[in-house]
Image (tube, helix red, strand yellow):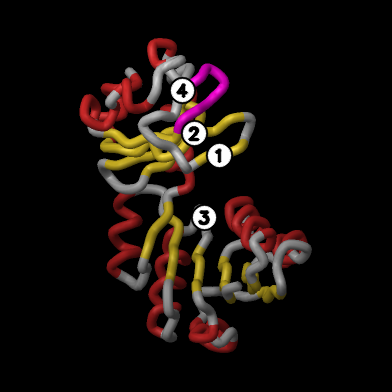
Amino acid sequence: MKSILLIGLGRFGKHIALQLNQLGHQVMGVDYNEDRVNDAMDVVTNAQIGDSTNEEFLRSLGIDNYDVCIVAIGNDFQSSLETTNSLKELGAKFVVSRAERDGQAKFLLRNGADEVVYPEKQVTKWAAIRYSSDHILDYIELDETHSIFEVSVPKSWIGRSIGQLDIRRKYNINIMAVKNNGKMTISISPDTVLTEDKTMLVLGEYKALQKCFHI
């Protein structure tokens, strides 16, 4: 369990709070808007109404006591930047800040953010890949060149074993696991036979995955 400071309780911030709450973490929620704070009370451990650009207010929260500080402020980049900078100056261990475009990310990283998230950009890319192909069921980007896809078994692979297909040598991708009726099996071998009712989790360079699955 981690102690997390979440600044910004709009739609994005509240969704983060909900997920953190379900994972069992302690969340201190902060927003200048009283209605947002009241609306999030059921998904945070504690909450404060205040201006995160006010350094004295931030200091009163005991910044160095949190394992992670998340700046989820939207539609006010100046406040996000000032908050990020102040958090780091006050001793924050790890700061994650929200950005809406690359230019913002550069400024945030230069002014205290350890990592930057792009909720709109990431969801847009996921949706474009997920819904532009009939057989892509899910997608996770690991870095700029590598990804994990959950894909249905191509028709030409059905009834054949992983060893027979020789996928690693032909395409330079790895089948990490197979799923059947929602149950995942990671104990796979060259003898594992792919059937129509299974899906696969495959790892590789994005270009190799594109070529293999005609994305």
Figure disc tally: 4
Residue 144 is situated, as x and y percent measured from the top left of the image, at: 27, 44
**What amino acid is found at the position of numbered circle 1 in the picture?**
Met
Alpha carbon separation for disc pair 2 and 3: 38 Å
**Mark 4 sits on what residue?**
194
**What amino acid is found at the position of numbered circle 2 in the picture?**
Val
Alpha carbon separation for disc pair 2 and 4: 8 Å
Q: What span is colored magenta in the figure?
A: 195-200
**Mark 3 sits on what residue?**
74
Secondary structure type for disc 2:
strand
Q: What label sits on residue 178 in the rendered view? A: 2
The one of 159 and 34 positioned closer to us in this rendering: 159
Q: Earlier in the sequence, mark 2 or mark 3?
A: 3
Alpha carbon separation for disc pair 1 and 4: 13 Å
Task: Name the residue: 46% across, 72% down.
Answer: 83
Alpha carbon separation for disc pair 4 and 3: 45 Å
Residue 105 is situated, as x and y percent measured from the top left of the image, at: 33, 56
